[in-house]
Image (cartoon, grey):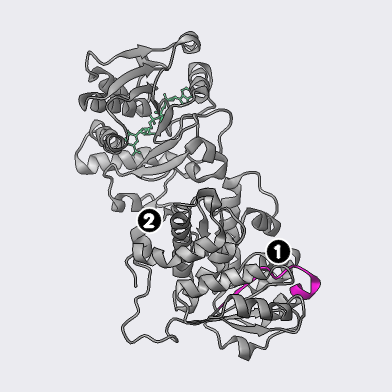
Amino acid sequence: MLEIISGRSVKKLDADFISDRGITSHRLMENAAQAFCDWFEKKYHRNDRIGICCGHGNNGGDGLAIARLLWRKGFDVVVFLVGDHDNASADCRLNRELLPDKLPAVSLTEEDIQHIEFDFDVIIDALLGIGVNRPLSGDFLALVKRLNRLIHVNKIAVDIPSGLPSDECVEGDAFIADITISFQFPKYSLLFPEHAGFVGHLKVANIGISQPFFGQFSEGKYYLQYKDVAKRHLRFGRFSHKGDFGKVLVCGGSYGSMGALKMAATASLRTGSGLVTCLAPKCGMGILQSSLPEAQVLTGEGENELAGSVDSESLSRFDAIGIGPGMGTSQTSSCFLGKFLENYKGPLVIDADGINILAKQPGLLNYLNENVILTPHVKEFERLVGPCQNHKERLDKALEFSMKHGCILILKGAHTAISLPNGKQYFNSTGNKHMATGGSGDVLTGMITSFLGQGYSVENAAVCGVYQHGLAGQIASKNRLRGTIASDIVEAIPRTYILLKID
Ligand SMILES: NC(=O)C1=CN([C@@H]2O[C@H](COP(=O)(O)OP(=O)(O)OC[C@H]3O[C@@H](n4cnc5c(N)ncnc54)[C@H](O)[C@@H]3O)[C@@H](O)[C@H]2O)[C@H](O)CC1
Ligand SMILES: [K+]
């Protein structure tokens, strides 16, 4: 797993790594530049015209090293220098001295920036990195604004788009990148939805700092990787039977919202559950039986919404339960949820209207425990904890909530955050914008419920569910783009197992 550490710890991390390995800071910068160029070379052509904008700190140093390496490989490169290069950082200065004589390097003043022509196919932003300590102004601001106005140019940020602080929300302007190549781990603020428009597509480049080094600086925040997820999966043997794959119950649905329950139940089946039962109001019987013949259907007391109660003995027959999709938030459904929480203490996912009911009846929060996973999207989360000013505050509150109530909280979004009661937070690296479609959350509920039913720990069910849900979204949207619907995500779940090499 990639540790996400704060900007203020990066300098110390670099210094410790350098002294431990007996290398120079220049070498580490060279590694960073090389990692960038290895990626760049695969994507761009020698006849692309490349402008590299370099500040006077180490981010600028990275830019200058990148310019030299690309030039040596035969790329058409021009360097623009901005900032106080008379007082540049040592490695920035050294890389400036190492620039080949023939490589054009132009110092820009605020005045030049307004008039100079930027006729490039690619702009590389190495103006400011994690050392930014104030909003952009002067020549930096002028250049960033100018670059942001350029069209038909591919814009790439080195480490972080210039102007974005590494751990906080931006104030003022920042470089708008199509792609951000962040070194070693994604800087925390690159995961904020407020910054999505600046970051573009996020890639992480390994610059050779080993994981044990990160361990010493751990702040309990991690970016999920393929291999971290694969190893959390349980393996089933040749003689496994459907009982081993778990019996799960998905509860919810109401008149006009039965599709949500159907989606969750189908996702449980596609994730591998041995037996899936739906518990719905009476109006759901025909719909569910005919649209999902593989599932069993139980109906509760209510005609159009879940009503009354189910005794604890009946509930204890299931290995895991998911509750909430499409259930509505009426008084009747709220009473149903209250009685359900009183009677069921096993592995549980609460989603959608289940969460909305908890928000309306905070007394029910007392039923949360270490077996429970909550999966709110941003609006549901704010109903639960109150309005937040920005995503950073949301993430802090999510962790607080999880620690206070002893349950797992999954805050859904572009980099879904899984908060654990032990204070750790995992950030998802899979998924894309095409998953922002009705029913996508119900699919996640079904997947996590399925993993719980298969005997995964709550943490592993949450991690595998979130990661694989994103992967299924990527597969589903590959040839459908904005035409992707939630059922396509369900259909793609089996292929995530192929990618993860898990049968
Ligand atoms: N392990 C790694 O991740 C490595 C990262 N590297 C790169 O180094 C930068 C961080 O470098 P640093 O010198 O600390 O900071 P900056 O380059 O961002 O520049 C700081 C410099 O700029 C001044 N400054 C701050 N804010 C502003 C502003 N708004 N306007 C103008 N000037 C500003 C500040 O006073 C300093 O003088 C990291 O992001 C990576 O790109 C290394 O290459 C090695 C490994
Ligand atoms: K940058």
Foreground of the two, 354 or 494? 494
Q: Answer whether residue 330 is magenta in the image.
A: yes
Query: From where the camera sits, is residue 234 visible?
Result: yes
Query: From where the camera sits, is residue 370 visible?
Result: no
As drawn, the residue found furthest toward the bottom would be 313
Q: Which residue is mark 2?
A: 225
Give, as a single range, the part of the protein colored magenta. 321-334
Residue 88 placement: quadrant: top left
Q: Answer whether residue 159 is magenta in the image.
A: no
Q: Is residue 422 left or right of residue 31?
A: right
Q: Is residue 71 left or right of residue 135?
A: left
Residue 356 tag number: 1
- Residue 339 position, x and y percent, is 71, 80
Residue at screen point 42% across, 30% down: 154
- Residue 91 position, x and y percent, is 29, 26
Ligand 2 rendered quadrant: top left
The C terminus - image quarter? bottom left
Query: Mark 1 near ligand 2 (CB under 8 Å)?
Result: no
Residue at screen point 28% across, 21% down: 76
Amino acid at circle 2: Gln
- Residue 344 position, x and y percent, is 62, 82
Disc 1 secondary structure class: helix
Amino acid at circle 1: Asn
The N terminus - image quarter? bottom left
Q: CA distance from mark 2 to mark 1?
A: 31 Å
As drawn, the residue found furthest toward the right would be 331
First of labels 2, 1 by sequence position? 2
